[in-house]
Image: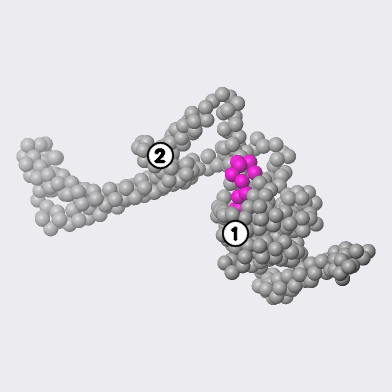
């Protein structure tokens, strides 16, 4: 019997092997923790404290807060586990499930591994506790669990990593700090170990659209007809808000703005404002000519009609006819700027009035959308929070 076979046959050899693996994992975790601490800003310095305070204030404005997790190299899976299950104790299980999914979907993830590292070596390293995980692991986790992961960063738009194209999808919210550390994001009053249920405006819009289609199906209405009605309704709203009667122009702006009514209204108003300014500049010389014409005719008519009208009119018009050419030109010069300024003031007043009406319309639309959301049940509102609408998508 060889030495290896004898070692395998000895009692307790499996326990020693497990103990050796455990110690190896602990050493890897300690190395990762030491590396992260070296790369972090000085805890006693002002930069780290200011960064944390700024991040906390940014989340507080959204009704959220940070739930910190240990920076032991497993922070990503700890943060995702806290969102998914309410605690981070199963981070090793989440790590292994993510690696297994990447191996099964190798053709999707292998192109994004660094050129000098084989895919087998990359996933083998990622499967070890304490190994830092990046965007590829987040994508694999999101696809494996069929959900979306939203990443918060300081002074940056939200990143949404979509694991599915379904309309009504669960979201996990995590924060990315210090350049390589992840924390969990919770509602500001949530101190429980229950799973987090956060929902963004972007997700709410998808859910409202899906619910609307479902209602149309239950009523026996064709979805295409419903969408056509939605387009006509959007065109009507944009036309009413802007005063534009060009159907094709409204549709073009709606398509360019992805059928966002507010954006289409703003774009059309900008176009109309630019067209109005150009028209005013083009017609201004002609207006001056027209203003000169009637003045000269009035002066000439004063000379012609001085002997044919009554005494009072004759005196007045004769006095106008007797005005010297210098006084006449001076009168014209003093008259023209007044008329032009008046026209400009009138144009500015109309534009200001249009902007006020636009603000009132947008406010009314927001109030109507807000009243539509008040129909949600109290239980749903307790498990949802409204965030910003700006997203940058990360997809593989």
Question: What secondary structure do most residues of the magenta stretch adopt?
Answer: loop
Residue 325: give its label.
Answer: none
User: In the picture provided, is 300 more to the left or to the right than 48?
Assistant: left
If the image is split into quadrants, where does the C terminus sit? bottom right
Q: Which residue is drawn at 90% across and 64% down?
A: 9
Magenta stretch containing residue 202, yes or no? no
What is the x, y in percent for residue 242?
A: 41, 41
Instruction: Give the magenta-colored segment's residue range.
Output: 159-169
Per the image, the residue denoted by label 2 is: 251
Secondary structure of residue under mark 1? helix
Measured along the vertical axis of the image, is residue 284 above or below residue 9?
above
Q: Do the residues labelled 2 and 1 touch (CB within 8 Å)?
A: no
- The total of numbered circles placed on residues is 2
What is the x, y in percent for residue 341?
A: 29, 52
What is the x, y in percent for residue 151?
A: 63, 56
Q: Which residue is drawn at 9% across and 45% down?
A: 300
The alpha-carbon separation of the residues under discs 2 and 1 comes to 43 Å
In the foreground, 27 or 43? 27
Per the image, the residue denoted by label 1 is: 110
> What's the coloring here?
one colour
User: In the picture provided, is 82 more to the left or to the right than 346?
Assistant: right
Q: Quadrant of the rendered structure where residue 106 is?
A: bottom right
In the foreground, 20 or 283? 20
Secondary structure of residue under mark 2? helix
In the foreground, 47 or 194? 194
């Amino acid at each position: 019997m060889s030495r290896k076979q004898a070692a395998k046959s000895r009692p307790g050899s499996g326990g020693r092997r497990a103990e050796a693996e455990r110690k190896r994992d602990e050493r890897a975790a300690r190395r990762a923790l030491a590396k992260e601490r070296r790369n972090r800003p000085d805890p006693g310095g002002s930069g780290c404290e200011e960064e944390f305070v700024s991040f906390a204030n940014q989340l507080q404005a959204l009704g959220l807060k940070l739930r910190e997790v240990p920076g032991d190299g497993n922070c990503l899976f700890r943060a995702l586990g806290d969102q998914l299950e309410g605690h981070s104790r199963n981070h090793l299980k989440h790590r292994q499930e993510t690696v297994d999914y990447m191996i099964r979907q190798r053709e999707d993830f292998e192109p994004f591994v660094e050129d000098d590292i084989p895919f087998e070596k990359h996933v083998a390293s990622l499967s070890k506790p304490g190994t830092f995980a990046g965007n590829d692991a987040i994508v694999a986790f999101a696809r494996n669990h069929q959900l979306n992961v939203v990443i918060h960063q300081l002074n940056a738009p939200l990143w949404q990593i979509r694991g599915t194209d379904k309309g009504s999808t669960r979201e996990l919210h995590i924060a990315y700090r210090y350049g390589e550390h992840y924390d969990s994001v919770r509602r500001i009053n949530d101190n429980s170990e229950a799973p987090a249920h956060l929902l963004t405006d972007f997700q709410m819009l998808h859910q409202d659209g899906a619910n609307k289609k479902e209602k149309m199906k239950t009523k026996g209405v064709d979805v295409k007809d419903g969408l056509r009605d939605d387009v006509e309704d959007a065109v009507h709203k944009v036309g009413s808000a802007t005063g534009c009667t060009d159907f094709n122009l409204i549709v073009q702006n709606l398509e360019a703005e992805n059928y966002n009514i507010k954006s289409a209204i703003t774009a059309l108003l900008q176009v109309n404002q630019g067209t109005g300014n150009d028209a005013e500049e083009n017609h201004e010389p002609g207006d001056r000519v027209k203003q000169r014409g009637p003045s000269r005719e009035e002066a000439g008519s004063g000379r012609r009609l001085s002997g044919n009208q009554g005494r009072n009119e004759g005196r007045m018009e004769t006095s106008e006819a007797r005005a010297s050419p210098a006084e006449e030109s001076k009168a014209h010069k003093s008259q023209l700027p007044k008329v032009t300024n008046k026209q400009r003031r009138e144009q500015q007043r109309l534009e200001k009035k249009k902007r006020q009406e636009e603000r009132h319309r947008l406010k009314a639309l927001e109030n109507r959308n807000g009243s539509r959301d008040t129909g949600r049940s109290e239980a749903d509102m307790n498990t949802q929070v409204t965030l910003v609408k700006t997203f940058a998508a990360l997809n593989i």
